[in-house]
Amino acid sequence: MGITNINGLLLKKMIIAGANKLNSKKQLVDSLNVFPVPDGDTGTNMSLTVLASAREIEKSHSLNIGEIAKLASNGALRGARGNSGVITSQLFRGFYKGLEGLEEAGTKELANALARGVKTAYKAVMKPKEGTILTVARACAESAEKHAEEITDIEKFLEKIIEDGNAMLLQTTDMLPALKQANVVDAGGKGLLLILEGAYENMNTEGEIKVDEPLKTNTVDFSAITSASNEDITFGYCTEFFINVKNAKDNVVNNLKAYLGTIGDSIVCVADEEIIKIHVHTDHPGLALEKALTIGSLSGLKIENMREQHTNIIDFGGSNSPKEEVKNDEPAKEIGFISVSAGSGLSDIFKNLGVDEIIEGGQTMNPSTEDILNAVNRVNAKNVVVLPNNKNIILASEQASKLAEDKKVFVVPSTTIPEGITAMINFNVAESVDANISNMTDSLSTVKTAMVTYAVRDTSINDKEIKEGDILGMLGGSITAVNKDVATCTKELIDTAVDEDSEVVTIYYGNDVDEDTANEIAEYVEEKYPDCEVEVQLGDQPLYYYIISVE
């Protein structure tokens, strides 16, 4: 007779196996990106999210399925990257809520948990679209509810769910015009099914399954990040552990957090009914552990030398290291700012406009919810404004805002770098926080963003035949110009973006363009549009030859 109930150890094995399967296939999922630009990172974001969940449960030996589901949810919540990662984390969160309080689960309980996951994920998206990961997840949940009445064997049950999920995945091509035109299925839905397939295929694997290391498939040159000296890392040891204590009192947690602030930074101190989760960068891990031992027993201990790691790799699965410590004895200012940015020039612009913390990231490298939360904790302000500057980072930013403690966090939903810059220009120190949030958000609609990049594969979009290596001009998320030459494509794109109401054109040139070449583009704009003020700024951004702001 087959397996009819899943306990905590088996769920742990299945989640880790699912995470490993997606990690091994994430390039396939990335390749399903509709636009052929070098930022198709759905698979990467989902993989890093689920690997964070798997790492959270790897050291637990609990037999309780509810406890394992809760740890998995916590890991996914904080490790979530990009929209696909945030939605995945919400599926995990609802799944945990459906299993809460259970020792083990059969098909009926699993069906209820899957349905709860879908409900939670739909609520997390302001305007859910069909033909996405949500559609595939719903099909899986509906299949589970249907077959739970007649099937008690977990393997057969999962087999049916995956079969019905794949059938729905194939239908996503016809649900969204963009998928239809590119002739691909939804990337997020494919990623979700890979997780389920990995879980199904390894149910009967003997022994424990280890969490794979994230595959480093990113080929973008982030040398500007890795070239920073080890001296820029304020505290050397990334220290993480759990304090096993039931229903910790608020004053205990707050006092612990205050103490950790005296020996380190990048602090996360979060309590639930059974544990306190600690993350701190410090030069004295032993002091943190000794303090924690006065509260309860410890588990899940991990101490990593960040300076040693920094010499070898960038850990895209971990948190960004802060460059300076927040001085806790300084009075908190009224409002502070965080901006996501890739490129030294763009980062300098944001800093000059008053941004307190820069999170390195953007296209192909979406920061996680925890990365954003750590940045929030480093800003010494009562109110913190986050500028995602990328549509794929907005949900993670909003998720971080809900997890933040002791500060109010606001997300101004900028989808591009020019929108983020415009928002900061519209900040008025004399206005209230609410008035500034309103004004900054309203200002986003006053700027148009044009970007020039290259195609990573052959495709056809909007009757445009695109070949790998072609230069692409994008305006408002649509490909409007295709050419073999960067300058020609850029000029064509600007001609599309500029109209009779345009007053200012700002050209941010990337790390593959020199200043003289950028000035030639500016001269073209000045001659053709004499009523427009034209500025040229070093962006130093990867992937995009030019980012152009038209106001």
Image (spheres, rainbow, N blue to C red):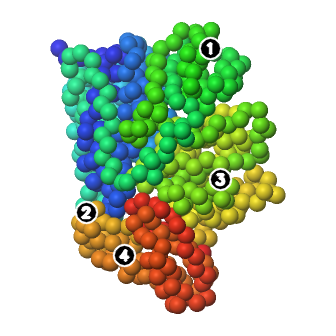
Circle 4: residue type: Val
Q: Which numbered tag is attached to residue 427?
A: none
* Of pointers 3 and 1, the one earlier in the residue sequence: 1
Which residue position is annotated with label 3?
355
Residue type highlighted by circle 2: Arg
Q: Horizontal and vertical percent for residue 438?
A: 70, 58
Residue 142: x percent and y percent?
34, 37
Mark 2 or mark 3, which has the lower sequence index?
3
Q: Amino acid at mark 3?
A: Val
Type of the residue with mark 1: Lys
Q: Could you tell me how far apart the alpha carbons at marks 3 and 1 are, in whole angstroms?
A: 34 Å
Please rate how many residues cluster around mark 2, counting C-alpha atoms within 10 Å: few if below 14, some from 14 to 19, many from 20.
Answer: some
On residue 486, the disc is 4
Q: Quadrant of residue 460?
A: bottom left
Q: Residue at x 39, y 61 (%)?
A: 543
Please report contact status of discs 3 and 1: CB closer than 8 Å, yes or no.
Answer: no
How far from the left and from the top, in percent, is residue 545? Answer: 41, 68
Q: Could you tell me how far apart the alpha carbons at marks 4 and 1 are, in whole angstroms?
A: 58 Å
Q: CA distance from mark 4 to mark 2?
A: 17 Å
Quadrant in the picture for the C terminus: bottom right
User: Foreground: 324 or 409?
Assistant: 324
Residue at image x 38%, y 13%? 61
